[in-house]
Image (cartoon, coloured by chain):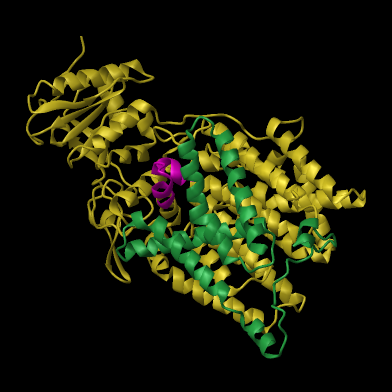
Chain colours: A green, B yellow
């Protein structure tokens, strides 16, 4: 169920971004828009989302913060991999893939606190809640999560 | 699938940002045939460096055409912007001049959305922050993009990632990566990070909310940051920090560059002041208030010696101050007890007002601009790029004043000194020796090269002072580039006459020509191509 919802969210995001980019840059061909959108997804959105996948935050927040973080990781890694002799032409494919694999690996590992709870017999996994706004209004979105 | 109000507002904001902001500026095209909307030398500086990294495969060294022909100069500029630009270029198929520029806008967009996430922690009316972020396209902020403060703008997006990680007490590795990204994108922003982080720690200490675990996390953040950034920080120390040590320099303006001021935000700044004021009294808002306040005050540090760095920070004020303004407006809405959905409507309304303008309110500048480059000169640079190695001599051209543009030929650029050129035009003499500038990116770091891990040399300090600025023999250059058109017809005419004189020599041939410029190739550099005394071409 959760996977289906994730896929739906990704589908909506992809279509929305493609549409916005096609309208904003209507003089470009669909191929340019498509390649640019998919690159943005591959470089920032997907790896960023996977980094925060376990967090109980709204989908869009994982995308926003994760993309910034994925951009930082890509930029830093690309600089150092270049210095180590790996030509920059490969970085756009390699680094996001490695980030996604690492994020997936760590998301499968249970956090220490969770392990501890399980050892104590509590089977309910610990999830980090998105905080309630301090002014007291709980966001309708968050309450749906 | 139930669509949520915030997400609709975000989609509207992204559309307005891309359509009326970037789309307008770029002529509603992502892929351009030449660098588009480049309006100053610094923009070309960044574009050329990104392209050079793509050509060389890494940023170990500066490309010779960037650093006056030296082949041993260490890559000294903070590298992240360029690497992201190159990666996006490979992925999307866009040229680096489009992809690198796009990265800056893309991260400004993400930064705007990040402040929404930050504000959401404090108010249910967080979407109200988004319309204020559209003011990144107001005239004074927009010059940060079009005039080339790109690394600073990108660095400030990472600054917001760091601020979020600290405000929400994320794991240390997230803060450390954000901090390293700031250092490796535009190192000077670290000063503002230290101010914010320091102020927040002091506040939390005061409230007795900064415990032992927080100290441990802070130390771990610092250690990991150093480990990640150390290699570049060594380079930074021996280049920028050595060549441009901090000097107390009070400046009130930024030359011809428009500066963002509180007045330029119009009556919206009242909302900001309201938000700031309430955050003083409302203790739940104080931490985010500190963020806005520090970044507001940091924008005034030009008066206490931080020079133009403060002005670069101000270019992001619409985003920083937008948080406090959204808090202020959200507070007013909560007083009249409007439902939360009302803030979504008001956010969209405010965004539309900012896009289209209203009396007393700041608005987006929606001017499309091709910028300095044009298809004819770009064709010339592309042709020069394809020619065998050699030194390129540029006669006067209207666009060459922004001289980083000349690095696009990927040949070491020399340029006639404008005053000497004008004197020669006035004397109606095509000279053999003109006072010439050997151009390159050395003003910051004296063409630094590495002798050891902690041992750097400086080419510019090892040569005579006039090495980069002296009379030089026109006949000694492999390539001479002359413009055929100019806003001053006299200059274009002079260039054409000079070309005709040079072409009288059979070893000098035209290898490229279009309506705007021509490239002459000298296959025997050093051979007499003009009389020593020059040629009088007057009537």
Q: Is residue B404 left or right of residue B514?
A: right
The quadrant where residue B305 appears = bottom right
Q: Quadrant of the C terminus of chain A?
A: bottom right
Work out whether residue B531 or residue A77 is closer to the camera in this orientation and state it.
A77
Query: Where is residue B352 shown, x and y percent of the image?
Result: 72, 35
Q: Is residue B149 visible?
A: no
Q: Quadrant of the N terminus of chain A?
A: bottom right
Residue at image x 46%, y 38%?
A31
Q: Give the main secondary structure of the magenta stretch.
A: helix
Residue B161 seen by the camera: yes
Is residue B175 rendered magenta in the image? no
Horizontal and vertical percent for residue B146? 51, 38
Which residue is at the front of the view, B91 or B203? B91
Q: Which contiguous range is marked in magenta?
A: B87-102
Residue name at image x 24 percent, y 41 percent? B411
Q: Position of residue B39 (x, y in %)?
A: 47, 35
Up-down relation of residue A17 to residue B215 (above or below) = above
Is B328 situated above or below B225?
above
Task: Determine if the magenta segment contains residue B101.
Answer: yes
> In the displayed structure, does residue B44 sit left or right of residue B334?
left
Residue B131's spot in the image, x, y percent?
71, 43
Residue for point 65% across, 38% down: B16
Is residue B469 positioned above or below B220 on the image?
above
Q: Quadrant of residue B418?
A: top left
């Amino acid at each position: 169920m959760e996977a289906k919802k994730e896929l739906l969210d990704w589908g909506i995001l992809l279509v929305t971004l493609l549409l916005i980019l096609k309208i904003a840059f209507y003089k470009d061909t669909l191929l340019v828009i498509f390649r640019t959108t998919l690159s943005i997804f591959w470089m920032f959105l997907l790896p960023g989302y996977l980094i925060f996948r376990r967090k109980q935050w709204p989908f869009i927040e994982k995308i926003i913060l994760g993309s910034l973080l994925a951009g930082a990781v890509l930029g830093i890694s690309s600089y150092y991999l270049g210095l180590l002799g790996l030509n920059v032409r490969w970085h756009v494919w390699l680094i996001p893939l490695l980030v996604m694999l690492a994020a997936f690996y760590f998301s499968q590992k249970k956090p220490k606190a969770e392990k501890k709870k399980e050892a104590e017999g509590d089977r309910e996994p610990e999830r980090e809640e998105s905080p309630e706004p301090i002014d007291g209004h709980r966001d309708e979105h968050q309450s749906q999560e | 699938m139930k669509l949520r109000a915030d997400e609709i507002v975000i989609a509207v904001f992204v559309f307005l940002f891309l359509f009326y902001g970037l789309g307008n500026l770029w002529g509603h095209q992502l892929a351009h045939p030449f660098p588009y909307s480049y309006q100053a030398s610094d923009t070309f500086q960044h574009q050329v460096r990104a392209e050079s990294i793509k050509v060389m495969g890494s940023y170990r060294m500066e490309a010779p055409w960037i650093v006056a022909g030296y082949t041993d100069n260490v890559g000294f500029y903070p590298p992240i912007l360029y690497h992201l630009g190159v990666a996006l270029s490979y992925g999307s198929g866009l040229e680096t001049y489009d992809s690198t520029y796009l990265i800056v806008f893309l991260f400004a967009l993400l930064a705007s959305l990040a402040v929404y996430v930050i504000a959401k922690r404090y108010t249910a009316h967080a979407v109200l922050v988004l319309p204020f972020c559209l003011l990144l396209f107001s005239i004074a902020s927009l010059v940060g993009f079009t005039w080339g403060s790109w690394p600073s703008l990108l660095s400030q997006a990472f600054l917001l990632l760091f601020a979020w990680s600290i405000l929400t007490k994320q794991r240390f590795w997230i803060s450390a990566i954000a901090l390293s990204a700031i250092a490796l994108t535009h190192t000077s922003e670290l000063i503002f990070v230290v101010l914010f982080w320091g102020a927040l720690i002091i506040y939390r200490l005061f409230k007795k909310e900064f415990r032992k675990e927080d100290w441990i996390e802070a130390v771990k953040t610092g250690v990991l940051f150093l480990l990640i950034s150390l290699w570049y920080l060594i380079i930074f120390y021996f280049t920028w920090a050595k060549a441009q040590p901090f000097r107390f320099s009070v400046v009130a303006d930024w030359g011809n560059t428009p500066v963002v001021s509180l007045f330029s935000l119009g009556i919206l700044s009242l909302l900001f002041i309201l938000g700031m004021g309430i955050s003083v009294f409302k203790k739940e808002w104080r931490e985010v208030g500190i963020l806005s306040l520090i970044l507001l005050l940091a924008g005034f540090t030009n008066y206490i010696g931080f020079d133009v760095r403060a002005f670069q920070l101000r270019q992001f004020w619409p985003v920083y101050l937008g948080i406090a303004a959204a808090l202020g407006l959200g507070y007013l809405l909560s007083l009249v007890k409007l439902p939360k959905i009302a803030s979504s409507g008001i956010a969209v309304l405010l965004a539309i007002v900012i896009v289209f303008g209203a009396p007393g309110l700041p608005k987006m500048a929606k001017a499309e601009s091709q910028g300095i480059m044009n298809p004819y000169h770009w064709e010339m640079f592309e042709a020069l790029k394809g020619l065998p190695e050699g030194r390129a001599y540029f006669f006067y051209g209207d666009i060459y004043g922004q001289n980083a543009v000349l690095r696009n030929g990927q040949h070491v650029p020399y340029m006639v000194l404008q005053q000497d050129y004008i004197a020669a035009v006035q004397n109606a003499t095509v000279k053999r020796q003109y006072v010439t500038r050997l151009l390159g990116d050395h003003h910051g770091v004296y063409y630094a090269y590495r002798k050891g891990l902690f041992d750097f040399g400086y080419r510019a300090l090892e040569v005579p002072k006039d090495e980069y600025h002296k009379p030089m023999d026109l006949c000694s250059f492999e390539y001479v580039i002359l413009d055929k058109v100019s806003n001053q017809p006299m200059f274009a005419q002079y260039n054409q006459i000079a070309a005709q004189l040079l072409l009288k020599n059979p070893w000098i041939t035209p290898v490229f020509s279009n309506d705007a410029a021509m490239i002459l190739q000298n296959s025997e550099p050093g051979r007499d191509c003009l009389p020593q005394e020059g040629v009088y071409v007057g009537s």
